Image (tube, coloured by chain):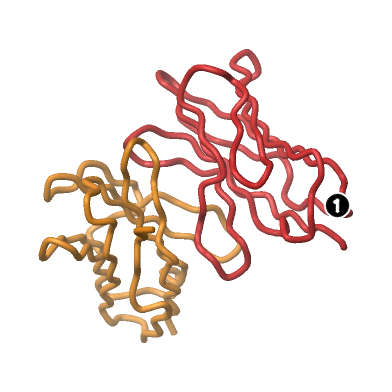
Chain colours: A orange, B red
Amino acid sequence: EPEVTQTPSHQVTQMGQEVILRCVPISNHLYFYWYRQILGQKVEFLVSFYNNEISEKSEIFDDQFSVERPDGSNFTLKIRSTKLEDSAMYFCASNAYNEQFFGPGTRLTVL
Amino acid sequence: AQSVSQHNHHVILSEAASLELGCNYSYGGTVNLFWYVQYPGQHLQLLLKYFSGDPLVKGIKGFEAEFIKSKFSFNLRKPSVQWSDTAEYFCAGGSQGNLIFGKGTKLSVKP
């Protein structure tokens, strides 16, 4: 069964560094998403992406964040100049028939 | 503003007890509602979804949910829980765009 994959599973970085979180959505899906879940809090929408551009973004998704689909398979989330409060689980999802399929997440720890 | 709220933060049940987890939504327009489950250390998995039609929706693993428009509710039910149902349960609402999640309800089932 096809699934969304994410790498790395855990990323540790120093405050102020840039990180790139990678996702491989399910191959025939057209809509892609990033969500985050700060420990103990709800899952929050960050951004959606369709047809090689951002279709919707939340207030959280400021200039510190960017997304890219550099090739036909990967979908990346870049966080510039990480802050302590960026520590969270980051989930990628892709969509077909109004159902979102989630990846296993990347745990980002900012020290 | 669109929102999804879950009433219970943590529910503790014994095996074979019946389960009902509350979810209320505040939405304009078309309502698509979902319940996701997150087992410890795993990613979000779809339990069931409601788009239209029969308001009683049956999902995987014996779960069901009922959409009650007049109450803006979409409560999750299971007649007899098992220890393996221990997980966190998230109600979510949305369309093909972003999903708005509730805060989640942690379910602990005692063997």
| Residue tagged 1 | B13
Residue B97 position, x and y percent, is 32, 38
Q: Which of the 4 image quarters holds residue A13? A: bottom left
In this rendering, the count of numbered labels is: 1
Q: Is residue A87 above or below residue B25?
A: below
Amino acid, disc 1: Leu
Image quarter where the C terminus of chain B lies is: bottom right
Q: Is residue A12 above or below residue A84?
A: below
Q: Nearer the viewer, residue B27 or A9?
A: A9
Residue A49 position, x and y percent, is 22, 48
Residue A53 position, x and y percent, is 14, 48
Q: Is residue B111 above or below residue B16?
A: below
Residue B1 visible from this viewpoint: no
Residue B40 position, x and y percent, is 63, 67
SS at mark 1 in the image: strand
**Mark 1 chain:** B
Q: Residue at x 24, y 72 (%)?
A: A80
Image quarter where the N terminus of chain B lies is: top left
Structural crowding at the residue carrying mark 1, measured as other residues with C-alpha within 10 Å and reported as few (<14), some (14–19) or many (≥20)? some
Q: Nearer the viewer, residue A1 or A53?
A: A1
Residue with the most extreme top position: B70
Q: Residue at x 13, y 45 (%)?
A: A51
Q: Residue at x 68, y 42 (%)?
A: B62
Q: In the picture provided, is A15 more to the left or to the right than B18?
A: left
Q: Nearer the viewer, residue B4 or B12?
A: B12
Q: Which of the 4 image quarters holds residue B80? A: top right
Residue with the most extreme front position: A1
Residue B49 visible from this viewpoint: yes
Q: Residue at x 21, y 61 (%)?
A: A66
